[in-house]
Amino acid sequence: MKKILVIGANGQIGTELATALVKLHGAKQVVTSDIQPAGKHPELSYETLDVTDAKHLAEVVRQHDIGEIYHLAAALSAKGEEHPEWAWNLNMTGLLNVLEVARQAKLSKVFWPSSIAAFGPSTPRDNAPQIGPMDPKTVYGISKLAGEHWCTWYAEKYGMDIRSLRYPGLISYSAEPGGGTTDYAIQALFSAAAGSDFTSFLDADSTLPMMYMPDAVRATIELMGAPKENLKTPGSYNLAAWSFSPSELVAIIKQRCASFQAAYKPDFRQGIADAWPRSIDDSSARQDWAWAPAYSLAEMVDDMLMHLATRNPVTQAA
């Protein structure tokens, strides 16, 4: 069996996805990489890799006999708006390098994450459809929509097996958030675990689709393991669990931490959130590969607080 390469393995998704892949395939079959000098999984092979360096990427694929790539390295929404040229270069050049290396090396599969950021003001705010208007208003969202089209083009032109999910906001205790608009939820939970008050950079009623990281990782692995003939939906699949606002999350946290206090001071990220859907229609994923989330919102809060109690939490900057 050829090996699996996880690009961006030190990030929010990659940290937990690499662990899940090891459980499924064994440590010898998983190679991690990121731009940092060291990986977060010392038991795994690790390569310091800038995915915008096509030559080095090709060398890593060849040296480790890679058969599948999970390409997770990206600049997220808030940081992308602050540094647009850097974000576009990382997101687009990195993806095109992965697709070209995968084509030339004849890799069996590629996974690349899209996002709800690919939607925009013209998308229905409730139950955003699998196929519908998409007019993203951030560099991150524009790159995700363009990436979806590139993946479809490579799949159709070269017959490549490229799979993708439109992730909602993801919540995790395992890694620092990478600068996303939905990271307020992680900040709130880390603050509660630390016994600190919390200030949201979104207003109290900004409802957005969210998901717990274990469900997102499981969805990724289930999609990659599904028979190709079952995947009737081209491009990226909508993915959903539940939607909530900052005030709704705070209310649930206060049921567990009575002294927890929250304030609301929206910043530039409010405009980003206002252009995204409040909820997602993921019926195509449920039909094509039997997707269903395992965690309820309350169960996510309980599990997050339990895990954060075992570490030294700090309020995350998003």
Image (cartoon, rainbow, N blue to C red):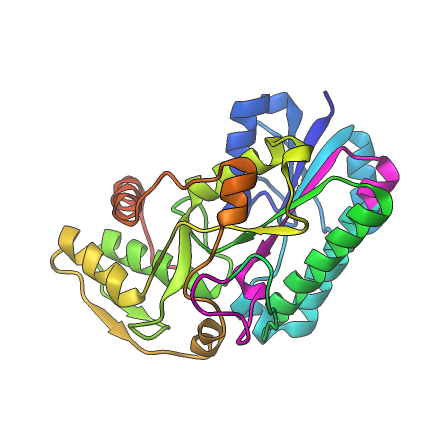
Query: Which residue is at 12% across, 60% downward?
Result: 259
**Seen in the image, is 219 located left or right of residue 194?**
right
Closest to the observer: 279 or 179?
Answer: 279
- Whether residue 121 appears in magenta in the rendering, the answer is yes
Closest to the observer: 84 or 160?
Answer: 160
Counting from the top left corner in percent of width and height, residue 293 is at 40, 41
Q: Quadrant of residue 26?
A: top right
**Segment colored magenta:** 101-128
**Seen in the image, is 296 located left or right of residue 258?**
right
Up/down of 234 relative to 215, above or below: below
Query: Which residue is at 54% across, 47% downward?
Result: 284
Quadrant where the image shows the C terminus: bottom left
Quadrant where the image shows the N terminus: top right
Counting from the top left corner in percent of width and height, residue 31 is at 66, 32
- Whether residue 255 appears in magenta in the rendering, the answer is no
Closest to the observer: 138 or 279?
Answer: 279
Query: Which residue is at 56% across, 67% downward?
Result: 119
Counting from the top left corner in percent of width and height, residue 299 is at 27, 43
Which residue is situated farthest in the left direction here?
258
Report the number of numbered marks: 0
Counting from the top left corner in percent of width and height, residue 45 is at 65, 30
Up/down of 246 relative to 256, above or below: below
Q: Is residue 52 visible?
A: no
Q: Is residue 92 visible?
A: yes
Query: Which residue is at 59% across, 65% downward?
Result: 132
